[in-house]
Image: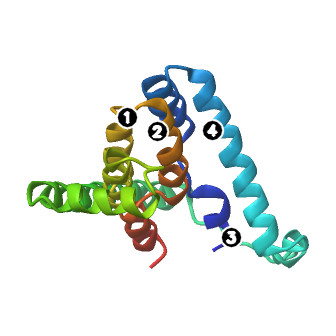
Amino acid sequence: AGALCFCVNSGPAFLVAVVGQGIFGSPWAGGFLVVCQLIAGMLTGWLLLGRNWAEKGGRGRKRNFRPFTLALVESVAGAGAGMLNICAFVLLCSGFSSLLAARGVTPFLGELVRNFTGGFISQEGGETLLAGALEICGGCAMAGGLDRRQAALVLPFLLSFGGLSVICQVSACFS
């Protein structure tokens, strides 16, 4: 469970290339986001696990190592299963997002977000938030079509939350 504090975040390549360069027009903006996520992960881990986390890690436990050939086969099989799980949840949440948009639910909910925030977040920003809450890549792609102010309001939530798809992916890994 401690790994969740440090390992569940957007990858550096995604932040620099897609968000930084693709949305904000600057890879430096993406690099800044990488640093922010690293600091946030370390602070979260420190706050949740406490300063004595290293001492509670079970020093002195004897580890049983598996033979290399067995470890290799199990790691490749696990990686393949993990990729299938990731793809399945991305497809499920993207399909659900498309269904909501096709039925006119997303614009309605985007307008609710706009009204709730007093216009601080636009209807398009609200739609982007909702799409990203289901699947982060779709939400980030939509954020690319927003003006920079709206993108800057929406993206921190999306990049921190990760979306329902990521929650399902993590749940599948730690079942």
Check contact, mark 2 vs mark 3: CB within 8 A: no
Asked if the residues shown at circle 1 and circle 3 are in contact, with their CB atoms under 8 angstroms apart, the answer is no
Mark 2 nearby-residue class (10 Å; few <14, some 14–19, many ≥20): many
Cα–Cα span, label 4 and label 2 = 13 Å
Secondary structure of residue under mark 3:
helix
Residue reaching furthest to the left: 103
Taking depth in this image into account, of 6 and 62 the one nearest to the observer is 6
Frontmost of labels 4 and 2 is 2
Q: Residues within 10 Å of mark 4 (few under 14, many from 20)?
A: many
Disc 4 from disc 1: Cα separation: 18 Å
In this figure, which residue is indicated by the disc labeled 1?
146
Question: Given this view, does label 2 or label 3 mark the residue nearer the observer?
Answer: 2
Residue 60 placement, left or right of 4: right
Query: Which circle's residue, 2 or 3, is located before the other in the chain?
Result: 3
Cα–Cα span, label 3 and label 4 = 22 Å
Residue at which label 4 appears:
33
Q: Amino acid at mark 2?
A: Ala
- The quadrant in which the N terminus is found is bottom right
The residue lying toward the viewer, choosing from 121 and 20, is: 121
Nearer-N-terminus badge (1/2) = 1
